[in-house]
Structure formats: structure tokens, C-alpha cells
Amino acid sequence: MGLVTVVATVIAIVLSMLLVATLLCIRRDQWATTIDEMPDRLNKAAPYVSLLVIVLLVNTAIRPFGPDISWLINLNITGTIYSIEGNFVVWLQQFVRPELTAYFSFIYIYGYVFLLVFPLLAYLALERQRYLQELTIAYAANYTIGLFGYLLFVAFGPRNLLPDLVQQPMYDFYPQMKLLTSAVNANTNVFPSLHTSLAATVMLFAWRTRVSYPRWVPIAMVIGASVIVSTMYLGIHWLIDVIAGIGLAYVSYLLGIHLAARWELSIPKPRWLAQHFGR
Amino acid sequence: MNDSPAPLHRRAVLGGLTGVTAAGLSGCLGRIQSAIDRDPPRQVSVGIKTVPADDDREAVRIARHLAENLETAGLAVTVEPTTEDKLLREVLINKNFDIYVGQHPGQDDPDFLRAFLHSKFSEEPGWQNPFSYSNITVDELLDLQKEAGDDRLEVLAELQRYIVQDFPFITILFPEELRVVRTDRYTGWADSPLTDSLGYLGLSPVGGGAGTDDVQPGDGDTDRDGTLRVGLIDRRSTRNLNPLGVEFRDHGTITGLLYDPLAYRLGDDYVPWLAKEWRWVSPSHARYPTLELSLREQQQWHDGEPITADDVVFTYRFLRDTTMEDEDPVVPTPRFRGRSSLVDSADVVGETTVRVQFDASSREVAQRVLTVPILPKHIWEEQATLTEVAGIELQSQTTEALIWENTEPVGSGPFQFAESSVDEHVTLERFDEHFLQRESLSDPTSQFARAPHFARLEFLVYPSEQMLVEEANAGNIDATAPGLTPERLDAVDGEHVTVQIDESTRFYHVGFNIRATPFTNPRFRHAISRMIDRTFLVEDVFDGNARGVLSPLFDWNMVPSNLERATEPPYDFVGDHGSGDVDPDRARDVFREAGYSYNADQELLMQ
């Protein structure tokens, strides 16, 4: 399987999951209203989504040079992390079994992408667009602060330091997944865990929107917690990376709420849009 | 004193108290000063640098094995994984390390030890004495073996005994290199290892182009137009193809395909290559031998320029000093140093004839020089300028030649560069003007006539060893690069997929930075060597695919018998052989015997 096939599979499976979640959580009348008000909502969302897109583009542009920058700064904290944390991941991996490996590998890739995308759709479908704004800002904050962590520190994960003690079950059973993960990130960037921070961010917002989306709460919590555990189960992250990730999530969550309240951004409606949709 | 009793009493008491207090305090302060003002002995703290498991699982396991045993013995140890090119830069250029665990680039002749250990190389970057080792007796023995005739074996034996006592580095084992190959499209894998460039020249297509989509219908010579695909994890060659770039090369296989030497070494024989023939023009036991060599006629570089004696003379001069000037600084290449240092001067005698004057050496050792790659003068003389680059801290400066990425190399090899993409692939194609294609050849070169027998060679980068095996199973690649972890081989699956095992001269070793305490102390280094269980490493980590050794010489005929096994005192492991774990009491005794002491918490203390 080449990278293209892997990506296509991810898209297909995530789309199915989004469909199921939509049917479960979002009411039909909500969708009707959303489609009616789409231009307005997209308008309101545009500056925030653009901010997120810019952050992601900057991340992608810097990523190939990241490791070189980190090595020049030369703060290699792998050994330090291990000396503080010890063999927690080794202990966790005593539970490694093929069924759990299948579950956590699925969660680490497909579950994670779904977890990040669904709230964007769900919050777009809300009357109160504020939550979507908060979420996109929180995502942007995660990536931005995370990038600093990546550039500043060199940190290899447990599977790279302790190959005698730590397994890498996903890369053993599903080697083609490494095509995807190595295209997205370098093995020197485990601190902080962005998987954890983004998942925790979604979980925090799921609780925040529990009145609008009561069914989303247990789904987000289960999948989110599974993502966080999977990073360590699969030998990719240290517990310390996870703790840092949770901290990062909380900071980003607060930033999202705070900045969305302050900015109240909107772009002027382009004339063709007003003419076309008569508003 | 006055005669009023009350004030007298009070003053006296005060005075007395003051006196007593002062005396007490000064005594107390004196004690405090003696006890606390001495710098308290600190626990010995050591950092072991090696590559991450993604790059070489075995190296990390060796480092962790040593780290755990040293911790049992009371040292504070941190294993620091460092990406391959950064590690080589830190160890070989910046000398910023305590201990490293790594693989030696490979040896052709015991003379390689001279560049590896001689004190005159300790200030140079590269695989030249990265330990900063300096021992006059060893220096003398190294110089002696270079010149020795019949007594060379004895000199080498003596040299090995010194190395194994003093331990500037600790040789651990010679690994066998494992790779997966497919037998349905190409054959000849077993004939010579693929780490050697000649290995690719020995491959030929199997029968007609079954299953290949590169075969053009109507081609007369369809067999020779195929593409050989090799999978790799090491992506450095997609970023840098400079044969002099020491942090980017291991065995130099890909650059070896692009650049030719004057001769290749096959076993004990030299195979004439760019040089058609050579003869000694000095008497047979001359201390300073002289050689005259002739290049083959009408050879050309990949860009069409002719190969002449000028290029050979330039190469030898350039390797010794890439500034090509007679004044300081002198910046030799960090690779090929052992060989280039044998040449005293080289002169053009004719269009294709060169006379080489050697330093004091035997003919056997001097001939090594023929295996150095020849560089095109018209391309490299432009790179002979000093440069300043951040990130390299060395008192000498560096030249463009050493940091140039050379991403579109021009050599004279049987393969020429076609294209590459960073972190993805390097593709070479057959050079049809190469002498192998055109000349009639005599033995032993004739076995390579018209090689390579395929038109394109693609080196494809994959993110993991597991993927390499999968791709080989699926038929998307014809071979993997050598050096797979033994565990991967369980996944090999397919009718035409097989495992190739080759011996390797690239020994794993522990290197010390002898400039840093406590590694300045040979007894300390010796104590560390007792913490290594070669039996455990060979059986558990390498699955039996390795040879645990004390001596760094690959040819065991040259190793004195008492150094063959590392299981006798005073070299033996201080624990049960094969268990991997030191006995804590015996381990501490070893360090005590070396003159060190422990505190109440069983921590080893710096002297």
C-alpha cells in the first residue's frame, strides 16, 4: 500500500464515521437550518478557519526544517524524560494483545481524525456560532504552541530509546501506517503529544457544549480517552508527553474561549453573496 | 580589671562567654570548614550517545545493556539517542560526547588502525582518532606495522595486546549483515555483498523479463534494460552525495557506484579498474616505495570530460589538503585519511601515467592507496576554498569541499546519477561510456565485463524496516539494504523471497572521549569493558548473527590466540555469561580495584 492508498482509506473510513455520528447527534431540522443559513455561517466562520489554515500551512512549511533547527538548539531531553518517568510505558504494555492493538491502532489514526473533524461540523450546525469560533482558535493555539515545543526540544519516544523493553505494535502489525505518520511528523518530536492535546481539547469542548449535544459527550470522552491511551500503548509517547499535552489542551481551551469573546470577527459580506442569496 | 565586683563579674562573664563562644565557634567553624568546604565527591555521571532504534535497533540495545550494568555498578547513566548524521558530527567533528556506541565504517587492511588510533590524527575530524587517544608505544607500533615486512604479524599482535589493555575503544562484535532479496528477477546475490559496490555489478537478470514493465517490445537487448529497486531506511544519500561528507556516509556504497578507484580489492587481490596496470619502480625492500601506474585509454567522466593523470594527481593532493594551497590551514578530508596519508607526493609522468612516491611503508600497505576514489579535478578544484559554517566547532577551518552536498555528482563509475528527491529516492543509470562496456578486459577484471546488467538502479526510501520486508514480499522492490534487525526476518514471506546473510567488517564498538574525566583513566575504561556481556549480545540481541570479539581486526588469522575469546580474565564479564546482568558486588569490586570508591548509597564517586 502506498501513501496515496493509506490516505484514501483514512478518508473513506473517517467519512463513514462522520456520517454515523451526524445521524446520531445532529437533528434533521438542525441540518435544514444550517443549509439555509450556510452563507452567513461560512462568512462568520471564515476568519477563524482562515487563521487555522494559516497556522497549519506555516506548520507544514516549517516541518521539513524542524529537526535541523532542533538539533542546532540541541536540547535533547529524551534521557531526562526517561530518568523522571521510568518504565511507565513498559508497565502499560503488559496489556498488549492483538485485539487491543487492532483497537488502539484504529483509534490512533481513524478515531483521531474523526474526533478532530466531527466537532467542526457539529458546531457549524449550531445557531450559536461562538463555539465553532472557540474551537478553531483552540486548534490553532494547540498547533502553534506545539510547534514551539517541537522546535525547542529533541525528544525521541520510548520505542526509540527502549527497543529492548517497549514494543511498537502498530508498526509491527500495520507497517503501512508509518508511511502516513512519518509524512506528518518526525520521530524527534514526541514532546508534547499533539495527539493528546487535540483530543483533550475536543473533550473539553464536548463538555462545554453538552447541552446542545448531549450524545456527543460520551462518544467524545470514550474516543478521546482512547486516543490518549493509544499514544502510550503503541509505544510512541511518554506519560510526560501526555501530561504536557493535557496541559497544552487546557491552555488552548482557555485561549479559544477568551479570544473568541474578544475578537468577534467578521468579514464584510461580498456583494455577490448578498445578491445571490438575497440577504 | 577594676575593683567593682558586680561589673567585673558581668564583664568577666561576658568576656569569658565571648571567649568561650569565640573559641567554640572557631573550633566549630574550623570543623565546618574542613568538612564542608571540601568539594563533596560527586557521583560519576555518564552520557552514552547512540542512534535511535529507528536507525539501528542493535546499537541502542547495546547502549542500554551497558547503561543498565553501569547503573548497577553505581554510575548515573543517560542514553542519548541522536540522529545518525548529528551523532557523527558530535562524535567525529565536535568531539562533544562521553561515550558513544556505533559501527565502524569498515576495514580493508589492518593499517586502518593507524588512522583510527594514532595520536597525530587526534585533532582531525572524521574517523581519525575520535577518542583523542595518545600513547607513544601504540604510535610506534602503528608506524612499525605500516613498514613491516615478514614480521608484520608479530607487530600487529603486539599492537592488539596494547589496545586490549588500554582500551581507547572497546570492540564488541562483528555483526552479520542481513537483508532480504528477491530471486525471481535478478540473480547473483550471494556472490559478493551489496555493501560493496562490486556486489551490484555481479547481478544479472533471470531469464526473460517476466513480470517487468520496463521491458520495451522490440528491444534487441531486453535483458539489460531492466530496473533494479533497492529499499532503504537511511535517507542521507537523498540529501548528500559527497564522498567526502563523513557524517553522510556509512560504507559509501552509493558514492562507490558513482566514483571509481584505480583498483578494487577483492580478498587479497587487487582488481585493476581505472588503472590498467601498475609497477613498482623502487627496489623490493625500499623503505619509501615508488609506484608507476597507467590509466586505461580514453576514459571519460560522466559529463564527457576525459580522465587524465591530472585527475589522479589532483585527487591525492586534494585528499591531503582540500585547500590545495601550500600554507596553513591544512584541511584534509575526514574520509580516506588513512590511505591518503600514505602518499608523500604524486606526479604526472604522461597523459595517463602517474608516479606515486610513498611515505615509509611496506608495499603491502602502500597499495591500499589504489582503492581511493578518483575525483574530477575540473569539478572539485572550485570547492577548494575555506568556508565558515555555524555548528562545526573546530580550531581548524573547513572547506567547501567537505560541506558541499554534491547532489548531482559527476564521477566516472559504472553508474551515473539520474535523479533524486529528498527523503524519497536516489536513481542511478548505467553509464554506457564506462570502460566495462567498451574494453576487452583481462582477469580478474573480466568477470565484470559489460556490467551492470541492468539499466537503472533505484534506491527507494521507506520509513521502517517492517515496510521494507512488506515491499519485498509484495515484489515492489528487489532487495533491501543490508543491516536488517533479525526480528524482521520472521515476516519474510513469499516463494521468491529469501534472506541473504553476509559477513561485515563494520564492528560495533564503544568509543571513549579520552579528554573527559574519568575516561582519561585506562583502569576506568578497563572496568567499563568488564560490564559488557558479549555472549548475551550475540545471542539475545543479534540472534546469533554476530561474532563477539576483543580485537578490532576482522581477519582472525591476524588475532593472537589469547585474544580470541573475551571469556578469560582479565577480560571476562563480571556476571553470568549470557545473562546480560552484572553481579552487583563483583561489578563494584572491579571499580574499586580501578581505584574508585563508593558512598553509603552505593554510588560510584569521582576521584
Image (tube, grey):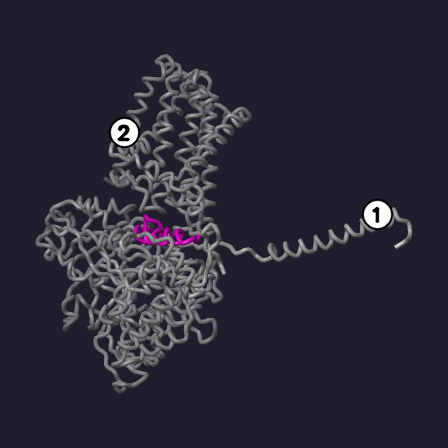
In the image, residue A128 sits, relative to residue B564, either above or below, namely above
Q: Residue at x 28, y 68 (%)?
A: B563
**10 Å crowding of disc 1: few (<14), some (14-19), many (20+):** few
Residue tagged 1: B10
Task: Specify whether residue A77 is painted magenta.
Answer: no
Residue tagged 2: A12
Task: Specify whether residue B53 is painted magenta.
Answer: yes
Image coordinates of residue A33 in percent, x first then y, are 39, 14
In the image shown, does A237 or B254 lie closer to the viewer?
Answer: A237
Q: Quadrant of residue B467?
A: top left
**10 Å crowding of disc 2: few (<14), some (14-19), many (20+):** few
Q: Residue at x 48, y 28 (%)?
A: A253
Q: Residue at x 25, y 31 (%)?
A: A99
Give the residue type at disc 1: Arg
Give how far apart the Cα atoms at labels 2 and 1 are: 98 Å
The N terminus of chain A appears in which quarter of the rendering?
Answer: top left
Q: Is residue B509 left or right of residue B445?
A: right
Q: Is residue B559 left or right of residue B16?
A: left
In the image, residue B114 sits, relative to residue B502, either above or below, namely below
Range drawn in magenta? B52-75
Answer yes or no: do the residues labelled 2 and 1 have beta carbons within 8 Å?
Answer: no
